[in-house]
Amino acid sequence: MEGTVRCAANHAPLTPLSFLERAALVYGARTAVVFGEKEYSWRQTRERCLAGASALARLGVGRRDVVAALASNTPAMYELHFSVPMAGAVLCTLNTRHDAAMVSVLLQHSGAKVFLVESQFLALARHALALLAESNNNKNKPPLLVTIGIGNADGGEAEPEYEALLRSAPGGFGIRWPADELDPISLNYTSGTTSRPKGVVYSHRGAYLNSLATALANEMRAMPVYLWTVPMFHCNGWCMVWATAAQGGTSVCMPGSASGMSPKGIFDHIARHKVTNMGGAPTVLGMIVNAPASEQTPPLLASKRVRISTGGAPPPPHVLAKMDELGFDVVHGYGLTETYGPATLCVWKPEWDALPAAERARIRARQGVPHVMLDGLEIKDPVTMETVPSDGRAVGEVMLRGNTVMSGYYKDAAATAEAMRGGWLRTGDLGVRHPDGYVQLKDRSKDIIISGGENISSIEVESALFGHPAVLDAAVVARPDDHWGETPCAFVTLKEGASATTTAHDIIEFCRARLPRYMAPKTVVFADELPKTSTGKTQKYVLREKARAMGSLPKQGRRSKL
């Protein structure tokens, strides 16, 4: 329009780095990060991040260089989310449950220039670097190893140490702001639940917008207190690393989180720090509700209700009902690594408060509607790209688009083009849209069980299984069947003390009483635990392989051991 201009006065690239600058200004003396007895204010956190950026620059890190990190939820991991992009570089946080071979592959693929590693993962990292050196045949320079949390007292070769680098970093560092808001800020590898991990590229713009969307979706007011149970390496902590800065919040990190967390630890931290918000996979919710009464200090008694966001497979209705009883307001959402984590949420409506508990839980299990920064959410026929009817029955593929969808897969143009074919991000997830516009997942396209020509949703069967009083965890996959083609095979973990009295027949009959007969499991396999990713997702491809190895079902209701 005539008379308008675009200049420095009215335009700046969007970036989460601005959140830290504002937090240090507005909330400078308030606590930003807590880790055991350690506490850092927002002013201190900014100073440490600037020192980190300065140190990286002195190590030769430049714009668009990749800096990898292998660490649990610690102050250093939090700071790297700002210091690395401050240096103009791209942060690549690696899954702490990967083995050395996978870490080596990801280091090579990412081309990381510096590799920061927490002390507890140092042996793994050194093994990965050795494998990388062998595979490179000295063609490429390996990343510089920087240790976090130790000096050089382990008897290994002298290596730079994180805190020492901060102390010796030259002062007066000038932040390398992105020249373009679409510049990359992070590189996140997919969890690999269905295939080899792919490198998902996030932009400064997308991270900025998704952080604000996440804060709004979780009703994070100014100065929230966020308890970290979601790994920061997973989608940059669902963008909560940056969202807490945007709101001047306090990040409470639990020591020892990499090796597992306890319900008692969660309740104790909620009470001690007056936690207002947290997140966690459905397995974390299950851990909370199944904890012994002696370990539970409900938030209602400790301070006030806690808002907890969860994603992945829908939490079973009885888990949602129990969480509500304990004082947790569960926000169920849906997203992928390709969408910066959360993309949809089940927005709660006041008129639902009067519904019976079971009905409220059923509604909360939906994946809901797009968050405020996502432009499009549709259920489409993946072949014709026609939108399916919003009747709660017509199944199609969940497709997304908007400013909070990834920039693409690193070094994989073909996979990027396929994922975004037709102008939509194809998720590979199947779902329905209810008449009120709310979306509900039915299954991954690979997880649908086709039995005698009927499509069976593994999620629906799992929901029935979770209703059994003896079931702690469950997952359902297809097992070959000479007659039906496939039949549901349930892998089940029982609650403590239930194994002596609960049989496969009991569980099958329980499901038959609640599902159409063809949907009930034909096989039940009992396991001490189910294979999981570090974020709590069940690795169904592992279970599918086990089910295929069992061969065609010879008879119904066979009890097996995993």
Image (cartoon, helix red, strand yellow):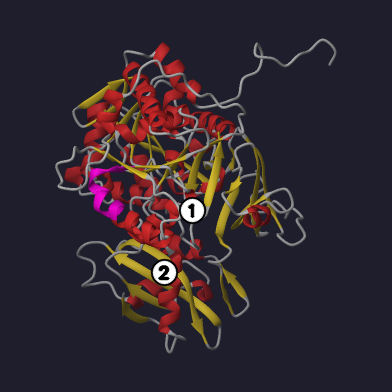
Judge from the rendering whether residue 400 lies leftward or rightward of residue 153; answer left or right: right
Which residue carries the number 2 mark?
A: 542
| Secondary structure character of the magenta stretch overall | helix
Q: Which residues are magenta?
A: 116-126
Q: Is residue 493 magenta?
A: no
The image quadrant that residue 550 belongs to is bottom left
Query: Which amino acid lies under the numbered mark 1 shown in the image of this protein?
Result: His
Q: Which mark is residue 109?
A: 1
Residue 219 visible in the shown view: no
What secondary structure is found at the residue carrying circle 2? Answer: helix
Residue 19 visible in the shown view: yes
Depth order, front residue of 416/219: 416
Considering only order in the chain, which callout, 2 or 1, is on the residue closer to the N terminus?
A: 1
- Label 1 environment density (alpha carbons within 10 Å; few <14, some 14–19, many ≥20): few
Up/down of 375 relative to 390, above or below: above
The image quadrant that residue 144 belongs to is top left
Q: Count the labels in the image.
A: 2
Horizontal and vertical percent for residue 14?
58, 25
Q: CA distance from mark 1 to mark 2?
A: 24 Å
Horizontal and vertical percent for residue 429?
58, 57
Q: Residue at x 46, y 43 (%)?
A: 235
